[in-house]
Amino acid sequence: MKKLKIVCLAVFAAVAFFSCKDETGEYVEQLFTNNQKEAAIKACLKVSADTASAHLFVPNGFYAYNDSIYQIDFEPLQSTLFAVLDEHGYGNLVDSLVLYVNRLAESCGSQVTPSLKAAVDSMKILDYDALINGKEDAITRYYEMYEYKFLKSAIQVPVSVRMDLYNVNGTWALMMNKYIQYTNVPLNFDIQNYIVETMLYDILEEMGREEYNIRTLLDHRTEDMDAFGE
């Protein structure tokens, strides 16, 4: 009889253990309301936006932060415009353009950062659990999908204002004149649009990195983020 009781207790303990083990995220789903999940998702985005801004919208942010992985370097022009100018001794113009453009981007924080947060406030969330339990940057990619047009427009404004202020337009015009002089081949390239889209890509990449930190490191979370679990 004693052995039977021991066996029954062991079976009960095993059942209890496996029933409490959360393999699917269902425990998180039941523990938190949709309002709490939405608060966690939006808090995640706002912290990510603050982190991206703190890293990029500072001197040497775009230009040299994190081994220059966010530098706006005009990769599509390396084998055409830049190669021709280098060949004819105008590599200094290339270096100047890259520096001016990155300094322009770094100066936009006071206008861009509030827009990043405004987009979070207005964002509609369709599936809380898919985002909470999604891959490492699921929330950032959802944000990108639904707010891309708004974010691009928000960045377009300060960039447009600064194109002359940072001598980007003047340097670009001089580079194009030299290029045509040596090649006589028109180059169709929207420099302002390239700057805006590259800035937005970089911001979202850095936000995605911070989202991963929020998901995996408790000290990156605020009190609104309990829905992410342990």
Image: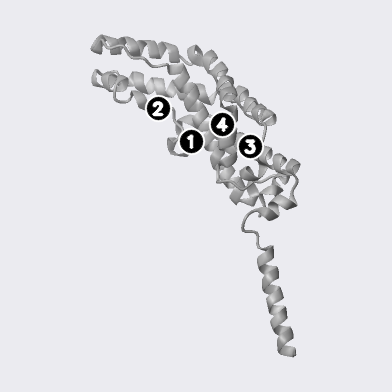
Q: In terms of image quadrants, where is residue 86?
A: top left
Q: Are marks 2 and 3 in contact (CB under 8 Å)?
A: no
- 10 Å neighbourhood of mark 1: few (<14), some, or many (≥20)? some
| Residue under label 1 | 65
Q: In the visual, does 6 lie left or right of 50?
A: right
At 55% across and 46% down in the image, what residue appears?
135
Query: Between residues 58 and 2, which one lies in front from this camera angle?
Result: 2
Mark 1 vs mark 3: give the one in front.
3
Does label 4 or label 2 sit earlier along the sequence?
A: 2
Give the class, few, some or many, for how many residues have Cα within 10 Å of label 2's Cα (few <14, many ≥20): many
Mark 2 vs mark 3, foreground winner is: 3
Return the residue nearer the eye: 58 or 46: 46
* Residue at which label 4 appears: 145
Inspect the image, locate mark 3, and give the three-letter code of the amino acid beneath it: Leu
SS label for mark 4: helix
Compared with 184, 5 (above or below) is below
Give residue 35's position: percent from left, percent from top.
75, 41
For marks 4 and 3, the one nearer the N-term is 3
Residue annotated with mark 2: 73
Nearer the camera: disc 4 or disc 1: 4
Measured Cα–Cα span from mark 4 to mark 2: 25 Å
Name the front one of labels 4 and 3: 4
Identity, as a three-letter code, of the amino acid under mark 4: Met
Does residue 176 show up? yes
Q: Amino acid at mark 2?
A: Asp
Q: Residue 60, image x and y in percent?
A: 49, 31
Q: Secondary structure at mark 2?
A: loop
Q: Which mark is residue 45?
A: 3
The mark lying in front, picked from 1 and 2, is 2
